[in-house]
Structures are given as C-alpha cells and as structure tokens.
Image (spheres, rainbow, N blue to C red):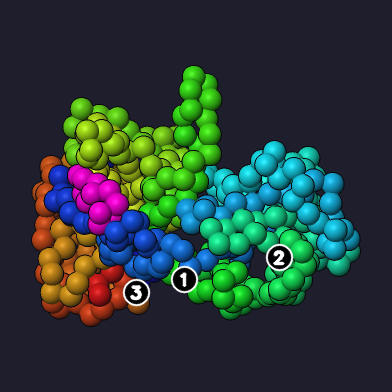
Amino acid sequence: MRLLATTIFALTLCFLSPLQAAVDSLVMGPQYANQVWYQFGVGTTATSPQSNWDLGFETSGVSGAIIANGGKGVNVYVVEGKTPADWETIDTTGMGEWTALHNSPESWTIGALNQPADTSNDLDLGWGSYNLTTHQVVGNRVFVVTTPTATKKLRIDALVGGEYRFTYANIDGTEEFSGVIAKSAFAGKKFGYWSFEGNQSVDREPAKESWHITMLKYVDMIPAGPGVTMAYPVTGILANASVSVARIVAEDPSTAPAPAEEAFETRANVIGWDWKAFANMAYTVSDSTAYFVKTASGDVYRLTFSSFAGSSTGTTVFESTSVVTSVSETDPSLRLSVYPSVVERCNHLELAVDASQHTTVNVYDVTGTLVWTTSVTDGFNAVALNTCSLASGKYFVTAQTNNGVISSTFIVQ
C-alpha cells in the first residue's frame, strides 16, 4: 500500500460535483495600482505596484523573452536598419511613423523585444541571435524605449553565463548605464525586472508554482472596426504558462459542467479583459460565461465573475468552485472530487465519490501510511473529513472498487 501514491492512473476530467463555491476577490487598489497574483484553493499570493518596473527578463525557459510594461505606458520601437555598431548615431528622426512593439497577450515567451525576430530563423530572438558555437545570444538590434517620464535608446548586449547584459542612455548619449539581470537572482520565478528610474533590478513576483492567474494592466488587441484590431491598454487577467483555460458560454455559468479536454487552451489571455463592460457610468460582468482553469497538477476550477468595481477600488469579485474529478480508466463509472484542494487544519474537507458499486475511500500521507478510511455505497456520496487529526502536509486520496482505483490530492496547511 505504501507504493499506492506512485501508481496513480491517468485521469480524465468529465464530472462535476455539487460542491460549494468559494467567493473571493482580486484587489488591485484605486486606479489599478497593483498587479495581483492568485492561486486557486489558496487565494492571493502576492501583490506588487504595477509601475515599479519597465522591462522584464525571462529567467526560466530558453526563449529569452524580454517584456515591456505596457500597462505603465512603456512603448518599445526597433530602430530599423541599425545595429549596436551604430549606437553613437542613433536618433529618433521619423519616430512619429514608427510602430510600437508590444508583448504578445497570448504568450509569456514573446515579449516586445522579441517581436522583430525573423520567424524563419530559430536562432533569432528579436533582440539578439544565438551563436551555436559559443552558446551565447549576442545583441543585433537597437531599440528606443519611451516611458511616461523618459526616452531611452537601448541595446541588449548579450545573454551569457545566465546573465542578461544591456546598455541604455538618453538619445544624445548622456546618462549611459550598463545593467545586468542574473537569472540565478530570480530562481523559481518567471521574470526578473528592471527599473530605468532606479537603474536597478526589481524582485516583484512570486514563485511561478505559487500562482495560477494574475490580474494587471497590459496591452491587448481590441476591436477597432469590422475585421480590425488595435493595441490598447486594458485591465484583465492572464494565466500562468503552466495552466490551461477553457471559456464556456452557458445559460447558468455557475453550474456549467466541465468541458471536454479539447476546449482547454494555453493562451495566456483566454480570460483576458472582455468579461466586463462599461455602460451608463457603471461596470457589468458577463452573466453567461464560465471559465475553467486547469492547473499543472490536473485540478480544475470553475471561475464566474460577480462584480467589477472599476478604478475606484480595483476590486473584482468572483466565485470559484473546484470541479476536478478523476475518472478511472478501468472503472469509468468511478469518480472522485476533493474540495478544497488546500485546507486549513481543523477545517472540513469534502470528498465527493460517485460509483456504481461499494467503494473504499482511503487517505494516505506522503510516506504511504494510511491515515483515514471509510466506505460508501453505490451512487453519489459526499463525505466530510475533519482534518484536525492530520498534520500539515500533502495527502493522497484513493477511491477503490473491485474494478478500479482513482486518486486525487489535497494539502493541509
């Protein structure tokens, strides 16, 4: 039995248990001052001022993404036909005709500075080119970056030894500064950030495993006429790269069943900004849309919006319901759901079991020791588990019949 936790069956999501929805909120503050990171089953894990950074440098992965703070009003322009060798002669002649570059709202790996990349050349990162011999990325373009208070010319000198090295200055060459972002200084996080105002790095986001969605100001493509879109700053929600999201329209979204696997997308902006609308001096939220967020561990949460206060408080109220359900490959009638997935010690946990025959439900700690057991009859069963007898940590739940076994997990804090 101690090996049971390591022999979990492949799971398919297809069952919705009638478990209680949790009401929660994302609070950005007046004028949407803060970015908020949120983990389902836990709550808000971090907040940070939206305006305390200008550029963000990807510190995990291999894409070398460099993003710009479009929500703050930072704009990036590539100086066409110029390379770092032309650094001393960079000017802004004709800048009014230049096209601003923005982060892709769909992917965290395509930042504003990655947009000039030649998509037919896998070695071109947009701001620099990967050298197969030295395994370094060497800068090959020059940018002009405008912030609400300054205009800078910028070159990314190299990504070498786990460090982004870059140089920026006023257009006339004054106040030149060379900066470094070391990936190791932001271990476990998606980006390390930089502020031109302070000429310094900024550690502002939580570990990438500790959040599922983030609410912030960013630039997205919005409708601007029939078949036309334009880049525009919005306030909305982007999903972590480790999760996928499905958007479902239903008569009653609060009871909408979980969709099929193919409905889930990895685009960061599936939730986005258009679940709310402004009319008659007030905001309304969609009463026909449900969002399902599938985490890296396979948990699925249904998200429906209740209200959006706008810039007065920057508060979004929503309901989330854990609808994660495991279905056994060997017994397709057997289903298991656990809510919440993270629970404070001495609070009750609900186990929902649906089966066509007698079922044994066991809870094991991480060592494989059986710490709780019960049995249920056929049909739907909601079982309450008092966690006072459990120590803080991760637990495995199994439901077993003569035809199969399924498993889920929860955490006691």
Secondary structure, mark 3, is loop
Q: Residue 385: in sight, yes or no?
A: yes
Q: For the residue marked with disc 1, what is the amino acid? A: Arg
Q: CA distance from mark 3 to mark 1?
A: 32 Å
The answer to whether the residues at label 3 and label 1 have Cβ atoms under 8 Å apart is no
- How many numbered marks are there? 3
Count residues near mark 2 (Cα–Cα under 10 Å), then give few for <14, some for 14-19, many for 20+: some
Quarter of the picture containing the C terminus is bottom left
Residue 360 image-quadrant placement: bottom left
Seen at 24% across and 72% down, the residue is: 412
- Choose between 80 and 2: the one closer to the eye: 80
Of marks 3 and 1, the one in the foreground: 1
Residue at label 3? 366
Q: Residue 295: in sight, yes or no?
A: no
- Choose between 202 and 269: the one closer to the eye: 202
Residue at label 2? 170
Residue numbers of the magenta segment = 306-321
Residue 204, label in figure = 1
Q: For the residue marked with disc 2, what is the amino acid? A: Asn
Give the mark nearer the N terminus: 3 vs 1: 1
